[in-house]
Amino acid sequence: MIELLESLIMVVLMVPIVMVIILGSIYGLGGLFNVISKIGKPKQRREQKHDGKSGLDAG
C-alpha cells in the first residue's frame, strides 16, 4: 500500500514538472524561430512592414 502511495505522489509531482519542461521548450523554440525568421528577411521589407505599407496596394 505504501508503495502505491509513493508512486502516486511521484506521479503527482512529476506531471507538472514534465509539462513545464515541454511547454518551456515549445516557447523557447518559438522564440528561436522568430529570431531566425527576422534574420532571413531583407531590411527593406521589414521597414515597409513597420510603416504599415504593403507591396500589394494598387494605388
Image (cartoon, rainbow, N blue to C red):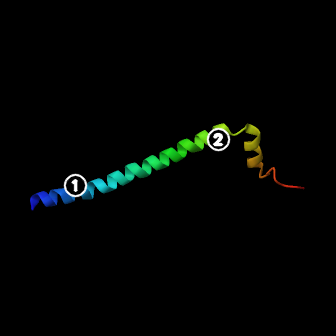
Mark drawn on residue 31: none
Of 41 and 16, which appears nearest the observer? 41
- Element marked by disc 2: helix
Residue at left 33%, top 52%? 17
- Horizontal placement of 42 versus 57: left or right? left
Q: Position of residue 46 (x, y in %)?
A: 72, 43
Looking at the picture, which amino acid does disc 2 mark?
Lys
**Residue 8, above or below 51:** below
Looking at the picture, which amino acid does disc 1 mark?
Met
Task: List the residue tagged with mark 2.
Answer: 38
- Horizontal placement of 59 versus 9: left or right? right
Q: Residues within 10 Å of mark 2 (few under 14, many from 20)?
A: few
* Mark 2 vs 1, N-terminal side: 1
Image quadrant assignment for residue 37: top right
- Horizontal placement of 21 versus 10: left or right? right
Q: Which residue occupies the extreme bottom position in the image?
A: 1
Task: List the residue tagged with mark 1.
Answer: 10
